[in-house]
Image (cartoon, rainbow, N blue to C red):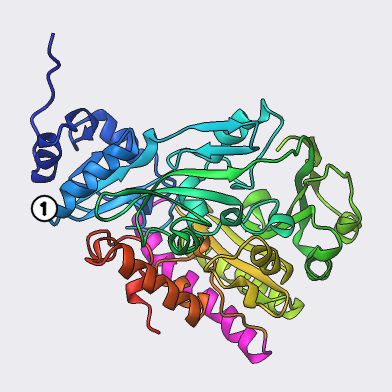
Amino acid sequence: MAAVFPKPTCSQAELLVRVGLETQILLPTSANYASRQESYWSNTAKLKPACIVRPRSAEEVSLIIQTLVAANEKFAIRSGGHAQYAGGNNIDSGVTIDLGLLEWTKYDAATETVDIGPGGRWGPVYAKLKKHRRVVAGGRDGNVGVAGLILGGGKTFFTARRGFACDDVISYEVVLASGEIVSADANNFDDLFRALKGGMNNFGIVTNIKMKAFKCEEVWAGLTYFPKQTTPGVIEALVDFTENIPKDLDSNLLCFFTYPEFKDIIIVAGYVQTAGVENAPAYEKWLALPSINTTCQMTSVSDVNDARIVAKASELHEKLVEEIKSFIPDGNFITQCLFQPLNKILGQRSAEAGGNVMGVEQQSEDGLLFTIVIMVKTEEQEIWVYPKAKAWLQGVQEFAATIDGMLSWIFMNYADSSQNPLSSYGIENVKKMKEVAAKYDAEEVFQKLCPGGFKISEVET
């Protein structure tokens, strides 16, 4: 019996049907279209594509690209759907290429490598590798998509020892603008291979990622909650931890001031000790602070580092919380003022692993990754709070600059659409990326027809 499919209601879908992809197309009238839209991490990313197409192989990705390019149709590329801003992985009235069916984790014991599908998320990847008592240097949140994290660089629990996630990649399978499928590694298409390490979606669509696998059977990890009155001690402990990362490459930390847990601002520290050392010396100052609660246990798996900057950021955060409370009096919102250590050894590890295009190795001082997170419920609230968040960031940056504490590097995975992380990679890396884009995409398909993300063509040299 022949299958019956709904008649396409948009020109883009009709194009894809003509090349035999009718079973992979989701139209706005279908339930599966709605469920894929709802699976985005951020409501801001829920645009309305004319249709969604879900390829099952690199060959189908190639067919889709050739079809859309020939018709001059715009498209977006989605991996795990974790981009927080509109247009990063979705598109209004265009075609969203949803890589969610390209999900696999194939471990090779002989070579200690693993092939990972770009459309997967890190939680299932770790679950499958656990059977082999292996891990990869991937995302720290199991819900984050594979390709987006790696192509943006990817900070992991192993960055101090192994570099960023992209530094542990052995090869990428890539569909180029022409539809050609190539395997890029350190020996073949080596310029493309390097450019993909932090270059995001400027050069093609990645359809497979081969990474190094390694043992890590037990970690000590958890969260500890502190009252806001401990802020001075927390700041001192954060700066001290960052400075001393080279002494303990296996201890990880993130720290954030947050509201409204406990109906007041509290401080949360997340610890992950990948060697399984309980209460490691690296956490000594943290463990000495009075806490509200802790969940630490054994389990399986850019600003300069200046205390005054952390204090200023937390001060501005407290003021912002009070301002938001006046606009959203029921307190139904969440804010996070997040700090992550960025010791200069992280860039050194990247260089030792072969290098990438992010330019982190140029960092001469220890720093902190500063991230602002504000989660609200409605579009009206988002419109109101967005400029407040930008003003908060600007206030921190302006203060940091007055004490010579501002680093120019912007981490791609955390960047807002108003920022320009590629320009922070350094002139030489920008030139190299432009050369790679011109070499493999002379018609600028991934600059013009794929408008989402940060575009190398828009960076001045």
Q: Locate residue 403, reporting x and y percent.
A: 68, 89
Overall secondary structure of the magenta section: helix
On whether residue 388 falls in the magenta region, the answer is: yes
Q: Locate residue 302, reporting x and y percent.
A: 61, 73
The answer to whether residue 330 is above or below residue 117 is: below
Q: Quadrant of the C terminus?
A: bottom left
Quadrant in which residue 360 is drawn: bottom right
Q: Locate residue 12, reporting x and y percent.
A: 13, 45
The answer to whether residue 251 is above or below residue 369 is: above
Quadrant in which residue 5 is drawn: top left
**For the residue carrying disc 1, how many other residues have a C-alpha within 10 Å: few (<14), some (14-19), or many (20+)?**
few
Q: Residue at x 68, y 70 (%)?
A: 368
According to the picture, the residue beneath numbered tag 1 turns out to be 71
Is residue 62 left or right of 270 when viewed as pictured? left
Query: Callout 1: helix, strand or loop?
Result: loop
Magenta span: 377-404
Quadrant in which residue 347 is drawn: bottom right
Looking at the image, the residue that sits furthest to the top is 1
Q: Residue at x 42, y 40 (%)?
A: 119
Is residue 63 left or right of 329 when viewed as pictured? left
Is residue 199 left or right of 156 when viewed as pictured? left
Q: Of the residues shown, which amino acid type is indicated by label 1?
A: Ala
